Image (cartoon, rainbow, N blue to C red):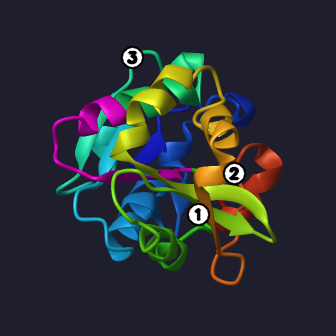
Amino acid sequence: MVLAAGGGRRLGGRPKALLEYGGRPLVEHAAAALRAGGVACVHVVLGASARAVRDRAELPGCVTVENPGWASGMGSSLRAGLTSLAGSGAGAALVCLVDQPGVGAAALARVRAAYRGPGTLAAAGYAGRRGHPVLLGSAHWAGVAAGAEGDRGARDYLRAHADALTLVECGDVAEAYDIDTPDDLWRLGGA
């Protein structure tokens, strides 16, 4: 699942999903990384400028999910994405953020490989610190959704279930930086 609904408030209202990276929108990069990391069905949660993202981004085979409450924060996008997966038969959701192009297929595949059934909780680690992607076994979806508020996403749930969380070191295959402000745009190579 790609969380790509934000409006880029700190970027002057430029939706992160449409920022260019390697000549294509970031949302395409994130969806392609999930596929290359072994995810068969990619759900992309859109919000701000959803119509423009659908018009400009090529997301063949992806399930696009619109989050009308995107302005309330990442928590609502996570809930929308988990709701879209309910009844799909998926045993887990591998969640990545559209604004982390330094987290690619290798890190996604490594965290995905931690799956041990619906009770799995796993996250990428960077020098021992939890980051993205995060793998949420389906047994945790209701609990995660119940606590996903504002920009907190699954953070509180993962903290409360730290004893069940597998941290998968990914610092050797990924860079977990975010594209949040105009000062970060250099990382996209001229966006």
Residue 162 in view in this figure: yes
Could you say which quadrant of the image residue 124 lies in? bottom right
Disc 1 from disc 3: Cα separation: 25 Å
The residue at which mark 1 appears reads as 101
Label 2–label 1 contact, CB within 8 A: yes
Give the residue displayed 48% in from the left and 67% down from the top: 23
The residue closer to the viewer here, 111 or 187, is: 111
Amino acid on which disc 3 is placed:
Pro
Q: Secondary structure at mark 3?
A: loop
Counting residues from the N terminus, which is met first, the one under dot 1 or under dot 3?
Answer: 3
Mark 3 Cα shell of 10 Å, populated few (<14), some (14-19), many (≥20) = some
> Gap between marks 2 and 1, in whole Å?
8 Å
Q: Amino acid at mark 1?
A: Pro
166, above or below 157, in the image: below
Secondary structure type for disc 1: loop
Q: How many angstroms separate mark 2 from mark 3 (CA)?
A: 23 Å
Label 1: few (<14), some or many (≥20) within 10 Å? many
Q: Which residues are magenta?
A: 81-98
Is 182 situated left or right of 68 in this image?
right
Which mark identifies residue 68? 3
Instruction: Name the residue that disc number 2 marks.
Output: 179
Image location of residue 76, percent across then percent down = 48, 23
**Residue at x 43%, y 48% (from the top left corner):** 2
Q: Depth check: give the residue in front, 130 or 26.
A: 130
The residue closer to the viewer here, 1 or 148, is 148
